[in-house]
Image: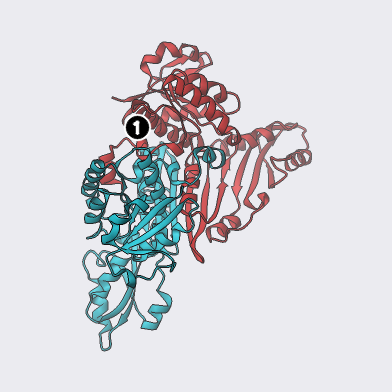
Chain colours: A cyan, B red
Amino acid sequence: MATRIGIVGYGNLGRGVEISLALQPDMELAGVFTRRDPASVETADPATPVHALSELAAHAGELDVLILCGGSRSDLPVQSPELAASFSIVDSFDTHARIPEHFAAVDAAATAAGTTAVISTGWDPGLFSLNRVFAEAILPQGQTDTFWGRGLSQGHSDAVRRIDGVAGAVQYTIPAEAAVARVRAGERPALATREKHARECFVVLEPGASPEAVREAIVTMPDYFEPYDTTVTFITAEELARDHAGMPHGGFVIRSGESSPGTTQTIEYRLELSSNPEFTASVLVAYARAAARLAAAGQHGAKTPFDIAPGLLSPRTPEELRAELL
Amino acid sequence: MATRIGIVGYGNLGRGVEISLALQPDMELAGVFTRRDPASVETADPATPVHALSELAAHAGELDVLILCGGSRSDLPVQSPELAASFSIVDSFDTHARIPEHFAAVDAAATAAGTTAVISTGWDPGLFSLNRVFAEAILPQGQTDTFWGRGLSQGHSDAVRRIDGVAGAVQYTIPAEAAVARVRAGERPALATREKHARECFVVLEPGASPEAVREAIVTMPDYFEPYDTTVTFITAEELARDHAGMPHGGFVIRSGESSPGTTQTIEYRLELSSNPEFTASVLVAYARAAARLAAAGQHGAKTPFDIAPGLLSPRTPEELRAELL
């Protein structure tokens, strides 16, 4: 029987989950649940049922796992524990510093309710985290470097958009090629923030705004841009719409270590994503399959990707996996 | 308390395990067990105790997990089920086609005995297999390509050494750059065997042997060399010893898929290894930690890397992993 999924929240990520589910042979979308007026939500597939989030309880019998597609700042800290008290869930909580408290809150709710809650999956946290753990366990003597990009950063784009005189903007994070090359070569360099990533902004000015004032406001912004080499390019609203509508991202996790003195071993994991939200959604969907299996096996409480056997993500049986992919 | 490891078989892999254990904070080497005369075995650390394999039972109280370092052709099919009947074990059984029967034999022994037996770990099978499973589960619509090398192939080197007139030889497997580039670019090409890898042989001739006859015998050898572009370079015994004593290897697993029509997503996992046996040993050691934890948790029977939660490989606690690596 197919695993029946509910999507909670329908932005780019929720839409990505809807699209991803259609590719999975053993999963089906029961419906989208939204805080907006359901009639106002245009789903990728017009046949997808859309319900008010407040009606969730009435649909409990049709749902095996909820995939939470809200944001980490205000949605998930509330929704994940609350919904884990009634449903098995998967979320992509990505505020690294607050993961321990999020885990504790979700674990308490899920353990009490006998549900399974997979938190902090996606690609970082998620697949990149897994690669950090594998690589460090295997090469205890070494250094792990994570590079992000080339990719669109929503947080940095928003920061530029808040500047006076900016009508529109996108920001790309760029891994520094020279730094990546040194890490790949096994040098294990000590790299300053400025040496690892650069930031590239494409900005549409409001009529009459001063390009120099906007540029200065961007490149001197503490934390967001000051610690980086930042380039600012002014473009038209048409160019912004035409050339910067995609949401590419990706990056590298590279661990270089020595298994014995002078014997260098390098492990690299790389993602090159044309659509960050669709890829993140695809990871959430695979972990929803694992959540359903763990719940069915009575393994309740909060889990992270570190706690989940990789085979549980696959639609194939353990026998098929051993015969075909091992 | 440290996890106490016994090494069964002391060739390049066993030596690698000995070296790797010294880097792990929570594991210790109880001893090497060999079918040879123990007095004839020179360990990397002269203080390492070496015992006859026949004395294993007498040391049972000092051992938590055995790491089996024999070959897949004749050693492991016998040793893994036999030793799993008394000990938790880890092996690197790598005859892909025979994994199902190996799993069944080891599982029967381990289940009956209440031990935990991790089979077929290392990097392929092992880390590469894990990446095939993750990538396919996340991107169900796509193509996975595995490339090996640049690396020394023991099997192909042995095949060259068996040819009349050959005094010594090494063979390197080379991934074809053009093919890797096409796969990375998301083309998902249909590649013939000859297009994916080339083979490079360095050969020392016996006195009076015909270079042309040897070259012909190599490049026409069915299965091993005939399906590939093979180059043969004749060198001196001194050059062989000086330039080809290392055992480098590595490779790539690349999956390129579409999360929606036209939206390409690429996942790449790459290893660049100065020493294949030391790296494989490092993977076995991390899985020995997992085996000890699974055994202590009462999770008995045969397991593969697909069945093992990644966090179990790390010396860190789940709390530390969530706070520091997620």
Residue at the image point whose x is 33% and y is 71% from the top = A39
Residue B53: x and y in percent read: 49, 15
Mark 1 closeness class: few <14, some 14–19, many ≥20 residues within 10 Å: many
Residue located beneath label 1 in the image: B24
Q: Is residue A94 visible?
A: no
Q: Name the residue nearer the viewer: A17 or B117.
A: A17
Q: Is residue B118 visible?
A: yes
Total tally of numbered discs in the picture: 1
Chain to which the residue tagged by mark 1 belongs: B
Horizontal side of A198 relative to B202 (left or right) equals: left
A228, above or below B21, in the image: below
Residue B68: x and y in percent read: 49, 25
Q: Name the residue nearer the viewer: A306 or B247.
A: A306
Residue at the image point whose x is 40% and y is 38% from the top = A138
Residue at the image point whose x is 25% and y is 61% from the top = A54
Residue B99: x and y in percent read: 56, 33
Q: Secondary structure at mark 1?
A: loop
Residue A139: x and y in percent read: 39, 39
Snapshot quadrant of residue A222: bottom left
Snapshot quadrant of residue A20: bottom left
Residue at the image point whose x is 43% and y is 34% from the top = B282
B149, above or below B54, in the image: below
Identify the amino acid type marked 1.
Gln
